[in-house]
Every structure is written in C-alpha cells, then in structure tokens.
Image: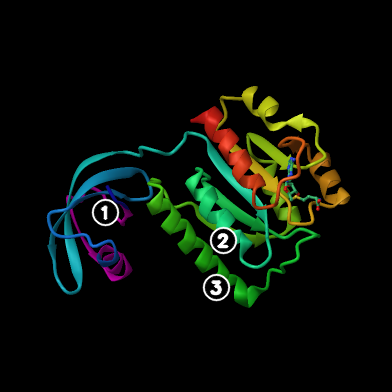
Amino acid sequence: MHKLFFDVPEGATEITVEGEDFAHLTVLRIKAGETVTVSDGVSRCYTATAESFSKKGAVFSLSNPRPFEVESDVKITAYCALLKSGKSDGVIQKAVELGAAEIVLFQSKNCVAEASSEKGDRKLERWNKISRQAAMQSGRDIIPNVRGVISFKEMIAELKTKDISMFLHEKAEYSSYELLSKSLKVSTIGFAVGPEGGFTDSEADEATSNNIPLISLGKRILRAETAPLCILSICGALFE
Ligand code: SAH
C-alpha cells in the first residue's frame, strides 16, 4: 500500500488534495476507491480512501487515526560532510531509507565541494525533495529534514548536545558497537562523517577536546558515502 504525506488538520475526517500532491497521485495512478496510508508527518497516520477526483483535486476520507508506525524512539541526526559531484544526493536517499531523523550537511577542511550560497538554496530544495521521495518509497512516517551547509564548528556544537555523539574516524580504536551497546536507553544520537579526503588531524583534535569520541567502523577504510549507511545500519540493529 502506498504511503503518502498530506497536511491533515486536527480532527479532520476528510481532506482535499491539490497542487503538487495531487499531481503525485496521478503519477502513482491512484484511482477512486483506492486506499492508501497517509501520514501527517507530525504525529499520526491514517487509512485514507480516495472518494472522488476532479480536474483540480481529489477528496480522501480518513479513518483509523493512529500513532506513527515505523519511527524509532531514538532520533538519529546524520552530520555528513559535503561531497563532490552530487554524491550527497545518494547519501541522503539511503540515510532516509535507513531511518535517519535528520540529515545535516557540513563543510570541512578537506571538502572538495564548496558550499556556495546562491546554488545552496536550490541544492537544499533538491535534497529535501530526495528525502521526501525516499520517505514515501520506504514507508517512513516523517520526512526527514535536510539542512545545511553548516560550518565544522557549528556541527561540533550541535553534535555534542546529543545523548550519544560519535566522530567517525578510520584511525579510531573505539568501536561503535562497544559504545552503542552500553547505552541502549538514549533518545538522541548524532554522528559525523568526513569528506572524501577525511578529517584533518586538527578537526579530530577539536572533536576530542569537545568530549566527542572518535569511533571506528572496523579496520577497512570506507568511502565517505558508505560510512553513514554503515553506522545507521548498526544503530538500526541495536535500537529497532
Ligand atoms: N582519510 C582517508 C579516508 C576518508 S574516508 C583517506 O583519504 O584515505 C571518509 C570518511 O568516512 C572519514 O572521514 C570517516 O568519517 C569515515 N570512515 C571511513 N572509514 C571509516 C572507519 N573504518 N571507521 C570510522 N569511520 C570511517
């Protein structure tokens, strides 16, 4: 069954879907009489039946309001260094599938890609569209927010406020499993992954001096686009 995201006013038993959401129904070939799952993206899911279609919109009746079904109690924020040539797109798509609550892009010294402000807004719009598509495809209850590009310092300041924070580093000795399996009762997790060229030593020192542990994902060096997916899978196995 399709999972769709619509704004649902409090207590509504019927909604009219117009604009882009309506166009999307056409793409999915949803017809009158068909039932889909709708999430309001905030706190509730509904069973929604397409009652009627006009040129401009579709009317759905809503039943069986219920709490979110697939979101984990642990909110994971993925801090990912900006990657070159559109590689961040793939990371965002797969991080959404693997349950990240939020994805934040940051600039680090070895980033090949530069965050430029005029192109930045368009990129952010594209990244949030990718997140929305991936959330629908994978049946998420929320559309994870994608934001950034923030500075390395801002990333560290945010990361250290999480119940568990991890600075992923290929030379680290402390394993993610060791850290996470000791702390199963947490509500927020954040991790940072460096760019293609890795973090600089002074960036790693800055994490350590902010009490953020350097964490290993094993003895092999993973690509910048593989590491976030690896740690998200480990979190999924431990917390879901
Ligand atoms: N500096 C290296 C590797 C960069 S890999 C080089 O150029 O050879 C890109 C990022 O993936 C790293 O900054 C780190 O955050 C993450 N990463 C890759 N392998 C890892 C591992 N084995 N453990 C933890 N993090 C890893």
Q: Is residue 213 visible?
A: no
Q: Please, what is the three-letter code of the amino acid marked with disc 1?
A: Pro
Residue hosting label 2: 89
Rendered position, 179 above or below 78: above
Residue hosting label 3: 122
Q: CA distance from mark 1 to mark 2?
A: 32 Å
SS of the residue under disc 1 = loop
Q: Which residues are magenta?
A: 4-25
SS of the residue under disc 2 = helix
The answer to whether residue 32 is left or right of residue 188 is left
- For residue 176, which quarter of the picture? top right
Mark 1 or mark 2, whichever is nearer to me? 2
Mark 3 or mark 2, whichever is nearer to me? 2
- Sequence order check: which comes first, mark 1 or mark 2? 1
SS of the residue under disc 3 = helix
The answer to whether residue 224 is left or right of residue 4 is right
Residue hosting label 1: 9
